[in-house]
Amino acid sequence: MTDADSHFDFLGYRFKRSRQGKVMRLVRPKSLRKLRESIKPRTRRNNGKSMEAIVADINRTLPGWFGYFKYVKASQLGEIDGWIRMRLRSILRKRRGLEGRGRGKDHQRWPNRYFKKLGLFCLLDARETEFASLRKGANY
């Protein structure tokens, strides 16, 4: 890895050198695509299941995926969380008779805490909890 644009993929991760010279761990695009392909059919707008059932279905995948990819850059986990919530907001919009994707005023109608109350597994929160427990364990 000599220049800033070089990278290599290994076991689902992409290792890339930042401009500061540090090596960043990212999710390999193919792995990200597979996650999205797994979530998409469960979050179709015409899904007849209750929101609690949809969240429970998604939650069967996310903790395991996080367990493997918890060391990637935090912003990537936030992007995935946002994408999943956008899909869920789209379902809620459709049920209200509205069109389009979940965005804009939908963030006030159904804020992130709404999905947290439903029990949606948040990758970014899980990462913060994981690393907080590691920091706490280092103080012994």
Image (spheres, grey):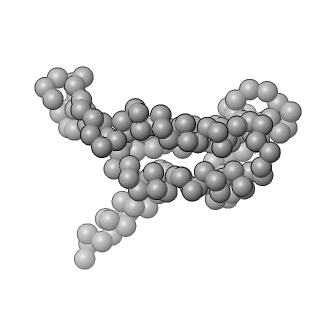
x 15%, y 29%: residue: 1
Residue 50 in percent (x, y) is at: 78, 52
Query: How many numbered discs, if any?
Result: 0
x 26%, y 69%: residue: 138
Considering only vertical position in the picture, is 104 above or below 128? above
- Quarter of the image that includes the C terminus: bottom left
Residue sitting nearer the eye, 110 or 87: 87
Residue sitting nearer the eye, 28 or 77: 28
Residue 87 in percent (x, y) is at: 65, 38
Considering only vertical position in the picture, is 29 above or below 42? above
Residue sitting nearer the eye, 129 or 45: 45
Res. 113 in view: no
Residue 15 in percent (x, y) is at: 26, 37
Task: Using residue 126 as the reference point, say whether residue 82 is left or right of it.
Answer: right
Task: Using residue 74 as the reference point, say whether residue 120 is left or right of it.
Answer: right
Q: Which residue is at the far left?
A: 2
Res. 15 in view: yes
Choose top left, top right, bottom left or bottom right for residue 101. Answer: top right
Choose top left, top right, bottom left or bottom right for residue 41. Answer: top right
Q: Which residue is at the far bottom?
A: 140
Task: Using residue 119 as the reference point, say whether residue 22 is left or right of it.
Answer: left
x 40%, y 32%: residue: 29
Considering only vertical position in the picture, is 137 above or below 128? below
